[in-house]
Image (cartoon, rainbow, N blue to C red):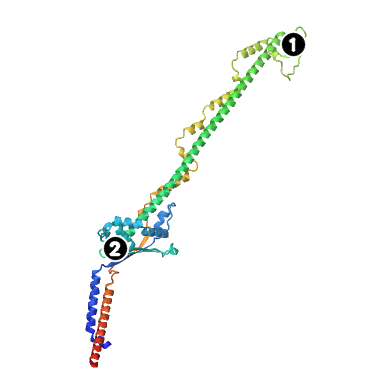
Amino acid sequence: MSKLIWQGRRLILLLGTLFGLSAYAYTRLITSEYQVISVLRPVALNALDALNRSGVYTLPPDKALTRVGSALESYGVRLGFFRANQALFSNLQRPGVTLEQSFESFNRASLKVITPPINKVGSTSALIRLELNYPEGVDGAQILNGFVEYAIEVERKHIEADLKIIIENRLVELEDSIDAARAEYDVSKQARIATLLESDGVQRSKLQDELVALRKQLRVGRMDRIAQLKEAIDIAQSLGIQKPTTPSGLAESSRVGEGPTMYTEINNQQIPLYFMGVEILEAERSALLKRNSDDFTEARIAHIAREMWMLQNNREVEVLEQRENEELFLNGVQPFRAEIARLGKAGNLDFSGIQLVAIDRKALEPLDPIKPRKILFVVLGVAFGCAAGALIVLIRNSMAARRVESLRGG
């Protein structure tokens, strides 16, 4: 058989060459398909430190990678990138096909996202692999790199929006707490003012009652004194006492004409009032009858007047009513204000400098297409041609041998 094949080597080589050339021509006619790859990994912890230190939003690297992976697989994100970069997909659009239909074909067959298994989420070795297959004439590397950046930016804006919503809600809670503290302060201040004014009113009423009682007491005492003086005057007049004297002096005057007598007077008790004499008693009685007020006779009345005058103006009430910056007197709001200041700084966080994922491998223009494989096609064509040539040689020799045998038999 090998001898027969060797004898038909020209035919075999001819068919192998023809089939090889045909396969090569076929590979030149069909559109080549290329593939680009991009790989994403979790970032280092310090890349998200500015966001995590805010104390408002916590985003570990593995969760950031998962969120970006979800954005890469999102239909809406892909459609948004397709619409925003239609110039990159101009070679994919065909006449009579809508934009959405062209995108659907691209989304279903061209782009593939390979995410890590669930049990590997959180591992430092977790990665996301993106593969994009595209026909010749399309800038696949730019499309894939642009899509990765677009998805990262979309997710960054989502995180920024989430952070702003959290901050706004927390600020509303803090403002409500401060308003509650302010309302509590207002109620407490008004209650304090009312308590002080009520206390002053009660004290003023007590002093007024005491003043009235003292004046009545003094008036009764003065009237009693006048009655005592009148009685003493009557007694002094009956005894003929005009000037102040003593019991011994009165006894001496009754012994006029008698010899000298020595008296010893022991004053161990109060001398009756009528010994003051009619003149002095009349003078005191006249003065008491002319008196219009007894206030000066009691020191307590002056003290009461002083206290009542001081109660006319409560300085603590005036200070409470004249406070201008009452925010300084709110109780328990300092932690709220400190948190508001902290949230304000967190709200001004520059998200453009926050790296959500690390691009471990960017898409690069491939050197060779993945479809068709020209060398494989040519090799298969040559092999098929050689096999066909060998088969033809064997069939032809077999037919020739049968013909010779038939001629010999005839």
Q: Quadrant of the C terminus?
A: bottom left
Quadrant in the picture for residue 219: top right
Pinpoint residue 13: horizontal percent, then vertical percent: 23, 81
Residue 252, disc? 1
Q: Residues within 10 Å of mark 2 (few under 14, many from 20)?
A: many
The amino acid on which the numbered mark 1 sits, given as a three-letter code, is Glu
Q: Secondary structure at mark 2?
A: helix
Residue 336, disc? none
Q: Is residue 179 shown to the viewer in this render? A: yes
Front disc: 1 or 2? 2
**Chain-order first, disc 1 or disc 2:** 2
Pinpoint residue 54: horizontal percent, then vertical percent: 42, 52
- Mark 2, residue position: 140
Q: Quadrant of the N terminus?
A: bottom left
Residue 161 versus residue 143 in the image, above or below: above
Q: As rendered, which of 326 and 43 lies closer to the eye?
A: 43
Residue placed at 24% from the left, 73% from the top? 24
Q: Residues within 10 Å of mark 1 (few under 14, many from 20)?
A: some
Q: CA distance from mark 1 to mark 2?
A: 150 Å
Compared across the picture, whether 29 is left or right of 72 comes to: left
The amino acid on which the numbered mark 2 sits, given as a three-letter code, is Gly
Compared across the picture, whether 307 is left or right of 275 comes to: left
Q: As rendered, which of 151 and 264 lies closer to the eye?
A: 151
